[in-house]
Image (cartoon, rainbow, N blue to C red):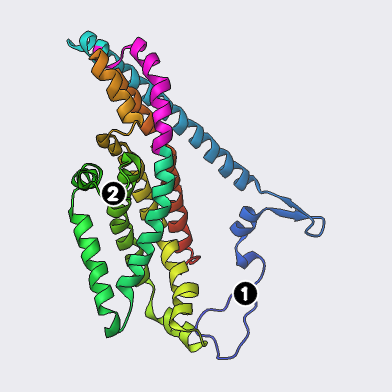
Amino acid sequence: MALRGRRRPGAQVTVTKEESGQEDADDRGDMSGGGDAYVPSPRRIERERYKRTRARRATAIAALSTLITGVVLYFVVVGAPGWPRTKETFFDAQYAREALPKVLEGLWLNVRLLLVCGAAVLVLGMLIAIARTLRGPVFFPLRALAAAYTDFFRGLPLIINLMIVVLGVPALRLQGVTVDPVLLGGTALTLTYSAYVAEVFRAGIESVHPSQRAAARSLGLTNRQALRHVVLPQAVRRQVPPLLNDLVSLQKDTGLVSIGGAVDAVRAADIIVGRSLNYTPYIVAGLLFVALTIPMTRFTDWVTARMDRQRAQGGTL
């Protein structure tokens, strides 16, 4: 018999099995054999079956709608009045086969530029960011120089920077200064992108709560040790997605070194276009850059989603 009303302080309440909620037992299932084997309940089996059916239906609907959209777009594009001329100018299979080997050979130069300039950008950007976050009046000139560097190269258009370095430096005819357009173009890319990456690193450093540094100092670490072992690991981990985005942009902008005569993918396509007056090689070069960029973009999205899940679960500081 259930008793209603106020319970006397300190009194014990006995709850029977029937009152504890039979529905929870239905969801958990049966534990037979003394808890050795798990047998899902009929309700749980039905729920899982419903989820699978719903997922298959959603996938089928998405596939069907995609197919219909693709067919409609195909007939709209092919039926357009200027499609034959567009196909001849931009999608000629003969010129595509001619351009593909040469553009691929030039693309290897873009990949090498990405690897070398990417590493240099990360190192230089980190040093500039650390310089901007140094404390104390004695470091004011260093902070001012770092701020001036980032402000200048973030405001200067990349194409102008490339023209000044790639075309202007050889005009000086200085002894011992290289005139290789690849080296000069890589230098210009490094100067510009290190300013952007430095701001990304600085934002990450300043996002770390001051209590982290204070805790490290209380444990006997010096300022340098606290920065290296406590602040920087957290800052870099938080800024991985924007750093990857900057590397994606750098990957595309390596094609701008062609303005100095370096035979990369863009320049190889430009040579064929200048001879044939057909623009299919540009399409080939563009598609190769897209194919090179998509995996890194998807990896960036995956890292961002993973870090968001960890942050929501308290997995990162």
Toward the viewer: 69 or 284? 284
Residue 299, quarter of picture: top left
Q: Amino acid at mark 1?
A: Met
Q: Could you tell me how many numbered marks the image carries?
A: 2
Residue 270, quarter of picture: top left
Q: Amino acid at mark 2?
A: Ala
For residue 237, which numbered disc appears in the image?
Answer: none
Give me the residue at 64% from left, 55% from top: 28
The local crowd at label 1, few if under 14, some if 14 to 19, many if 20 or more residues have their Cα within 10 Å, is few
Q: Secondary structure at mark 1?
A: loop
- Image coords of residue 170 (percent x, y): 24, 44
Q: Secondary structure at mark 2?
A: helix
Give me the residue at 35% from left, 44% from top: 183
Q: Is residue 103 magenta?
A: yes
Toward the viewer: 309 or 179? 179
**From mark 2 to mark 1, how far is it between C-alphas?**
85 Å
Toward the viewer: 268 or 136? 268
Q: Which residues are magenta?
A: 89-110
Q: Nearer the viewer, mark 2 or mark 1?
A: 2
Toward the viewer: 269 or 170? 170
Can residue 73 be seen here? The reply is no
Q: Which residue is mark 1?
A: 1
Residue 206, quarter of picture: bottom left
Q: Which residue is mark 2?
A: 188
- Image coords of residue 12 (percent x, y): 63, 84
Can residue 139 be seen here? The reply is yes
